[in-house]
Structure formats: structure tokens, C-alpha cells
Amino acid sequence: MKPGTKRQSSPLYRGRFAPSPTGPLHFGSLVTALGSFLDARSQGGEWLVRMEDLDRPRERPGAADRILATLEAFGFEWDGGVICQSRRDEAYREGLERLLAGDLAYPCGCTRREIAAQGLPGAEGPRYGGTCRGGLPPGRRARAYRVRVERETITFDDRICGSCGHNLWNEVGDFVVRRADGLFAYQLAVVVDDAWQGVTDVVRGADLLLSTPRQIHLQRLLGLPTPRYAHLPLVLDAQGRKLSKQDRARPVDPANPLPTLLAALEFLCQPPPPEPPANLDEFWHWALQHWDIRRIQCPPAG
Ligand code: GLU
């Protein structure tokens, strides 16, 4: 399939799991995989795996293969081949060019330090104040590309968290779609890929709840459909921080998947099987029969 072309079929439900290969799967990413898989399959939907290997500097060699082997050992089955974002630059470039052609994005010469020095508080670190909005100041060269945001509040109805959203102008400012190191930003890539792959339902961790209004904004500018969203509670470590592959959170053990799957099911507030399952088939049968996303509590804000 050529980048930029749409897949032919349009199922009622197509979900996806989109790990970044920055390390092996840990319990938190397994919870996300389980939630998105059960939600898709329990509704007769398709489930895709997309490797988000866009951020080459953060990637760990061998992590992508290890993630796929672990998913397989846990009994996950995905539809079609695994799409790798590292092969999709052409599609992201096309997206950026469309934004630039419509004057919806612009080159920015500001450094991270300069933006921080402006001291504008935002939802995820300093908010961009719009220095290069009207054109690059004399003597500055383009470093990154930013998309323009509006003063309107972007809201969406999350299947777990209810009504969510924020004002991008106040919380984020014009945000980066192509980074100073030349890599396309996650926000652009995810929007281009979700649309290209015909994803109808995004079920992912609540750490991305704040990204969703940015993604909806990009979908609107690019004329792409907005999927349904459900953000799962995050698994935290003893210090209350999100488990992270980069921080070398303990990997799940592919040699002994059942206890981990049962713990993940419990974390997602689903009823445990009355008897410990004898094998993976029994686990998946039970979990698919009893999945109900409405049992999950909305993660606390902040
Ligand atoms: N690649 C992201 C991660 O591993 C997930 C992106 C998404 O689900 O939209 O955290």
C-alpha cells in the first residue's frame, strides 16, 4: 500500500496497540495491550500493532522484535502486518506540506531554552508564546515546524473519563509537528497513521489524555476523522511514577504469562475467572466473554 492511501475496508471497530520500542514490555504496557485488545475483539473488531519507532535516538536495538515476541507468547493475535513508523516519513512529510500549504503551520527558530525563559506555564511544561508565528525573526533559521492552534477549547467524550479537553492556546500554544532534529513529531505521526490505518478506536494509557486535543486539532486541520478514545488508568511504581520502558521498568516474563495476564485483568477492574485458568485459551475465553470497559474507573486527574 502506498503511504497516504487509505485502506480499503472500513470495519465497525478497528483498534490498535502502538508501542514505542524503547525497551521490553513492562506491566503497564501489557495493561494497555490487554485493554485495547479485549475492547476490540469482544466487539468482533480488528486489532493492529503499530511500532512507533519514530524517535530513533530513544530506540533500543532489538526492542521491537522482543515486544512482538512477548505479545505472541502472551497469546495476542493481531491483524495484518506490523506497520513501522520509521518507514512512513513520506506520509508525514505529505501531512506537514499540507499544513504549510494552508498556512496552518510555520517554521520556528526558537530553542527550547528560549521558550523556557519566556516562563509561560502550560499543561506539559512551558507553553509556546508564538514568537515565530508571524514569520522567522531576521537572522533566525527554521529549526522546528509548529502548527497554529486556536483559542477555542477542544473537547471530546472519553469512554472511560467522560468529557475531557482543554484550550490549546492556553495550555500548549502552537505545537511542534517536525522537531529541530528533523524527526516528525509523535502528534503528527499518530494522527496520520490512525487515519491511514482506518483506526476507529484508540484505547491507550491516560498519560496521553493531554495529547488527545492536539491530535483532534490536527485531524480537523487535515480533514481526517476523529476516532473514539478511551484512556486507561496508568500503572504507577512505588514512587507514584508511570512505569516506563526507558526507565528500565521490570519486563513482563514471556515464559510465565498467566499470572501477569490475571493481574492485568484485575488492574482493569474486570472480574477474575472463578477457577485459575489452566492455559492461555481458557484465560482469553473468559476475558473476552466478560470484558466491560464501563467497569474501569476514570484515572484521577493530574
Ligand atoms: N507510542 C506511544 C507509547 O508507547 C503510544 C501512542 C498512542 O497509543 O497513541 O507510549
Image (cartoon, rainbow, N blue to C red):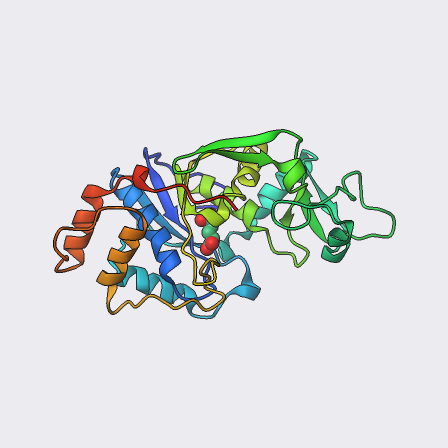
Q: Farthest residue in the front direction?
A: 239
Q: Residue 58: give x, y in percent of width and height.
A: 54, 64
With respect to residue 138, does 251 lie above or below? below
With respect to residue 163, does 25 lie above or below? below
- Identified at 43% across, 63% down, the residue is 238
Q: Residue 26: give x, y in percent of width and height.
A: 38, 63
Q: Is residue 75 left or right of residue 165?
A: left
Quadrant in the picture for residue 134: top right
Q: Is residue 80 left or right of residue 237?
A: left
- Identified at 49% across, 65% down, the residue is 246
Q: Residue 218: give x, y in percent of width and height.
A: 57, 37
Q: Is residue 201 left or right of residue 226?
A: left
Instruction: Look at the image and tell me whether residue 47 can be seen.
Output: yes
**In this figure, what is the number of numbered marks?**
0
Q: Farthest residue in the top direction?
A: 152
Instruction: Look at the image and tell me whether residue 91 can be seen.
Output: no
- Identified at 47% across, 46% down, the residue is 2
Q: Farthest residue in the right direction?
A: 138
With respect to residue 180, does 213 lie above or below? above
Q: Residue 287: give x, y in percent of width and height.
A: 21, 48
Q: Is residue 29 left or right of residue 225?
A: left
Q: Between residues 232 and 213, which one lies in front from this camera angle?
A: 232
